[in-house]
Amino acid sequence: MQAKTIEALVKKGFLTKNEKQALNELVTDLKSTWPGLKVKVFGSKVKGIADEESDLDLLILLPCDVSESIRREIICKVFDMNLTYETNISPLIMSENEWDRGLISLLPIHAYIEEEGIPL
C-alpha cells in the first residue's frame, strides 16, 4: 500500500530525513512568495521503488503564469536545497491553469500525479 503523507514516506524508509527537511523548507519558502502555490511529490520515491540514483520528483503549481524569471527563481531555490541537504529534488514547474487545461492535462503523467502524488 502506498504511503499518503511525507511522514509515512520517511517512516517506511522511502524518504530520508534530509529529504523531508529540504521539502518542508522549500515549500515554506515558495508559499511565502506565492501564496496559493500547490506542491505534490510523485515518482519512484512515493512508490517505494527508488534506488540510490533516483531523484525526488516534485510538481510545483503556481497560481499565476510561469515566466522564465519565475522558473529560474524556483530552480535556484531547489538547487540551494539540494546543496544544503544533499538531496536530488527535480521540479516540474507550471501554472495551475496550464496543469488543468493545457496539453499536459491530456498526458498519462497528469493522471498518474493526480492519483499517486502526495500533496505537501
Image (tube, rainbow, N blue to C red):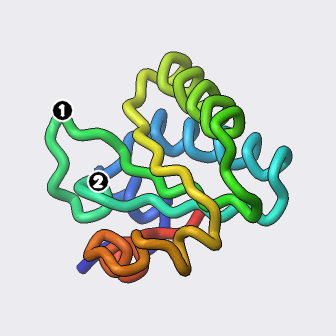
Q: Position of residue 31 (x, y in %)?
A: 78, 52
Tell me whether the residue at label 2 lies in contact with that at label 1, contact meaning CB atoms closer than 8 angstroms.
no
Indicate left or right for 59 with 31 as reference: left
Q: Is residue 33 left or right of residue 120?
A: right
Q: Amino acid at mark 1?
A: Glu
- Where residue 5 appears, x then y in whole percent? 48, 68
Quadrant position of residue 2: bottom left
The x, y position of residue 68, in whole percent, is 63, 37
Query: Which residue is pictured at 37% across the width and 74% down the height?
Result: 110
Figure quadrant of the C terminus: bottom right
Answer above or below: position of 84 versus 41: above
Among numbered discs 2 and 1, the one appearing first in the sequence: 2
Q: CA distance from mark 2 to mark 1?
A: 11 Å
Residue of label 1? 53
User: Where does label 2 land, which residue?
Assistant: 45
Is 83 in front, or is 113? 113
Vertical relation: 31 (above or below) 80: below
Crowdedness of circle 2 by 10 Å Cα count: few (<14), some, many (20+)? some
Please give left or right for residue 75 compared with residue 115 in the image. right
Q: Residue at x 55, y 79 (%)?
A: 100
Mark 1 residue element: loop
Report the residue at 36% width, 45% height from top.
56
Which residue is found at the position 37% from the left and 61% from the top?
Answer: 42
